[in-house]
Image (spheres, coloured by chain):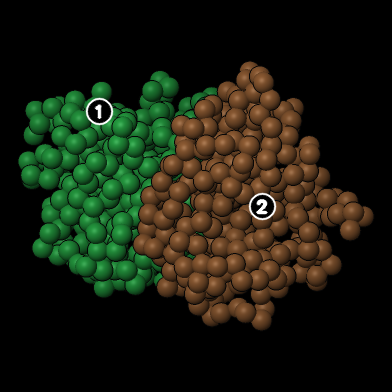
Chain colours: A green, B brown
Amino acid sequence: MNQTFDLLKAASTQAVRAQIRSGEYCGHTAGIGGKTLQANLAILPASYALDFMRFCQRNPKPCPLVGVSDTGNPILHTLGADIDIRTDVPAYYVYRDGVLAETIHDLQQIWQDDFVVFALGCSFTFEHAVQQAGIDLWHIQNNTTVPMFATNIATTPAGPFQGPMVVSMRAVPDDQVAQVAEISRQFPMAHGGPVHWGDPAQIGIANINAPDWGDPAPVPEGTTPMFWACGVTPQAAIMHAKPPICITHKPGHMLITDVADDAETPIYQPTKIPTGD
Amino acid sequence: MNQTFDLLKAASTQAVRAQIRSGEYCGHTAGIGGKTLQANLAILPASYALDFMRFCQRNPKPCPLVGVSDTGNPILHTLGADIDIRTDVPAYYVYRDGVLAETIHDLQQIWQDDFVVFALGCSFTFEHAVQQAGIDLWHIQNNTTVPMFATNIATTPAGPFQGPMVVSMRAVPDDQVAQVAEISRQFPMAHGGPVHWGDPAQIGIANINAPDWGDPAPVPEGTTPMFWACGVTPQAAIMHAKPPICITHKPGHMLITDVADDAETPIYQPTKIPTGD
């Protein structure tokens, strides 16, 4: 698998998706696809689609909507040359009535004609930019999942979708907080600027060492915990809404698009296909 | 009216909307509301709402979605303290089957329980920033409407919504083109960066002196015509879709929100109500 992974890191986005589609690769996507936008996934029946889209519009920092399919159409033509969402994500979670029911690698057997696909920007984009600026991120260096916390910040509800904002935490050296905030603000499609930094209790986090999702990460002396709106927020809202069926990506196993991660808008331009770098 | 207008320019956004709501003011909104976001308006029956929202998501430069109501609810709680869309816009156009049927100042008599309200960012925001940078805009100095043109750039369709991108044109001194492009890119909620500059024929404009909407404006020697995606684009797409009823603002007569025009997201924060300046 490591050999495959190294090959994938150098491959074009289309070649990567072909490997995923064929079932040859079903691992995580961190570091794959070069400087292209990766996306969180939510698939819902059409009867929930308008309310979910309103939820995303009203909560743009946790839910930066970068693509929406036509009803029943698995092809995401605004995000890439040939994206078939039934096969092009390495691993999917299937929720039934708001409860995780199974993990699968292909949706062809369970695809429904009333499905609407939503793609949401993810934090990989701004993490990449922070690292490019020479600032290390502990969870990446230590190959763990970023710690995530439910907060006392409420999302703005839409229909049955509601719940707390979930945030991810990264500890940053005190003198680089302003720089990291500024870098992340440049990526509104990847959660934008931080929603909070400093005292975790102010946003309802009782124990910084006990995340609700992901792995713990240290906050050493001389660093400040910084918090960003997180793509788990819509998953929590979907669990609250309890639709009969909902499909998401498995965390870390994202959709790799053909859109450059610094594009002004998340719209695929056929003449500008990025390649791995 | 001029006395009222001068008073309004100094008033808070809530005071302005109260004047509009009471019927005391029904004029244009350019220069009113201080540094707050103004918005284009489209109201559609719920059966068209998901497709229209997809159209906006796929065409973010002409259609920057800044607010969406709940179905049947005229209160836009994400854009301000007390916005009732039935009364708080100075003048409305009513389209029936895609044809302009009447201009009215109050929607209370024709409001429907299945209406969904869409608010879209408008160019007033970046024009304000360009002028702040000391760059004059001819149509504002001469109190005319900016010239607008249908182009050969197609929008990405969604359901029945489709049509050409409409652009607005502003002639900018050659040596300020880069600066103006950079300023406007900072306002993705106000159409973002230009879609083209230079030769009008490249985007299908045969005669720069004969706009399809608005008033002609000169392109003097030493200036470059710059073109931005324009809020008339969704109106053209709606006319193509021919819904039984659709309501828009009358051009220039915008919704004044309580969101700061440089806010990171178009979400009203009750603790940060901007005032006129």
Q: Which residue is mark 1?
A: A275
Q: Where in the figure is residue B222, as x and y percent of width and height?
A: 66, 19
Q: Left of A169 or right of it: where is B247?
A: right
Dot 2 crowding, Cα within 10 Å, few <14, some 14–19, many 20+: many
Q: Secondary structure at mark 2?
A: strand
Residues A196 and A11: in front is: A11
Residue at figure coordinates x 83%, y 50% from the top left: B9
Q: CA distance from mark 2 to mark 1?
A: 39 Å
Chain to which mark 1 belongs: A
| Percent of width and height locating residue B195 | 50, 35
Give left or right: position of B161 versus B127. Answer: left
B190 shown above or below B129: below
Furthest residue in direction right, as rendered: B3
Identified by mark 1, the residue type is Thr
- Vertical arrangement, residue B12 with respect to residue A35, above or below: below
Nearer-the-camera pick, B268 or A273? A273
